[in-house]
Amino acid sequence: MSLLQHAIEGGAAGGPRLRRVLSLWDLIIYGVIVISPMAPMTFFGVLSRRGNGHATTCILLAMVAMSLTAVSYGRMARVYPSAGSAFTYVGRELSHALGYVVGWSIAMDYLLNPVICVIYASQQAHVFTPGVPYWTWAIFFALVLTTLSVKGVKISARVNALLAAGMGLVVAVFFVASALYISNHSHSPGTFFTHPLYDPARWKFSGILGGTSLAVLAYMGFDGISTLSEEAKRPNDVLTATVLTCIVVGLLSALEVYVAQLVWPGNEQFPDIDTAFSFVAQRAWAPLFGVVGLTLIVGSVGSGMGGQLAAARLLYAMGRSGALPGTFFSAIDPKRHVPRNNVLFIGAVSLAVALLLPVIAGEATGFELASSLLNFGALIAFMGVNAAAFARFYYRADNKNIADCVMPLVGFLICLLLWWNLATQARILGIVWMVIGLGFGAWKTRGFKSNLIDFDIAPDTLPTTSKA
């Protein structure tokens, strides 16, 4: 996560430097692991409903949008190899005020990541144990994430790789089981294999746009590759790896949901929309219901813990720079070397939001609303990166190239279109969040006459990221 790494990177001038040891394949593998090979499984049911049964098409369209944005990220990473963050690109290329807007939108992403994980894990566990209410599981998982984060649990690269390999194995087994299921069951000739991509009876342009805006969730984390710019053997590999990661993840995600739609056609209702993929896996092969469900719970816990630590360090950076009360938010636990107050604060917020969102979601679900809110902030950041790339490589360039104009502009416009087609509730709540942030920023800086948060300072008071 770019903001996390930038917020906690330290080192005095002249101290140890990062080594350029990562190859192109190292960068791609890192990106795939960060995003997770099972990412679309967690929101398959919601995506299928939003896209009117065209989940596969939505995933592929989102891949186009994210690939264009990935080009902008990769190019900006060359210019600012040690920053690797959207708010830095926008703040330096456009203005401090716009950089703050992007930073505030990213903050919502970080705060919502553990919320989404708590909601999904709780919903999945509730499916396994219907007698235990959702709210009980929400309390349990919020406590688990907070406890592990406070203790500074370290998940090494080897453990992450093993977890990714385990997920990959589950995906492979699902593909085999689904192929056997499809081959052993009768289906209508001709259109059966094309309906997941285009079903004229259910095709609605508004539904496709709404589904694609949600499908962006499958790609969250690709921008993290830009944080490895100083460790890549060839700096140009960052751009290539960022784009290829989006394509690899997009094709894998599209294949997963395509097969799922063949097993469970889009016109059939799911027993539980938030955990729909587990029921699809069960139809393909009964034992996969528990295997897929448990794997997704474990993956959600791991992702949620990482998200909680990332959000805690974001608040730490804001507290240390004076944007938030420093006595609380910049405090570091002397034993664990983690911002304990922030972890506890985020744990409480995650629990409260995980319990509240399902109540206010209405016809949607708590997971769907939280996911759309996360994408609300992410798409603002992506628009900002595309705008920064346009300003840097075309508007202020001595030698203007048409590609430097078209690609970031198209990327910006597509992200804007997807942002506008997010769920109405998400846009309302997201706008409320942005208004609060803008009001606070304007008050703090007397009309943005100064930079509210200086993220360029070298943090030297949080020395042990390896222990978190």
Image (cartoon, grey):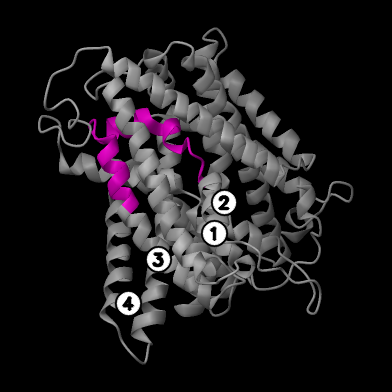
Tell me the chief SS of the magenta region.
helix
Residue at label 2? 30
Amino acid type shown at disc 2: Tyr
Q: Residue furthest bottom?
A: 398
Disc 2 is placed on an element classified as helix
Separation (CA) of disc 1 from disc 2: 7 Å
Residue at label 1? 225
Separation (CA) of disc 3 from disc 2: 17 Å
Q: Residues within 10 Å of mark 4 (few under 14, many from 20)?
A: some
Q: Where is residue 215 shown, x and y percent of the image? A: 35, 43
Disc 4 is placed on an element classified as helix
Separation (CA) of disc 4 from disc 1: 21 Å
Residue at label 4? 404
Amino acid type shown at disc 3: Val
Q: Is mark 1 in CB contact (under 8 Å) with mark 2?
A: yes
Q: Pick whichever of labels 3 and 1 is earlier in the sequence.
A: 3
Q: Pick whichever of labels 4 and 2 is earlier in the sequence.
A: 2
Q: Where is residue 284 shown, x and y percent of the image? A: 37, 16
Q: Is mark 4 in CB contact (under 8 Å) with mark 2?
A: no
Please state which of residues 157 and 322 is positioned toward the viewer in this rendering.
157
Q: Which residues are magenta?
A: 35-63
Residue at label 3? 71
Separation (CA) of disc 4 from disc 2: 28 Å
Q: Where is residue 136 shown, x and y percent of the image? A: 61, 18
At a point 57% along the width and 46% down the height, the residue shown is: 111
Q: Where is residue 211 shown, x and y percent of the image? A: 29, 40
Whether residue 468 is visible to the viewer of this picture, yes or no, is yes
Residue depth check, mark 3 versus mark 2: number of the one nearer the observer:
2
Amino acid type shown at disc 1: Ile
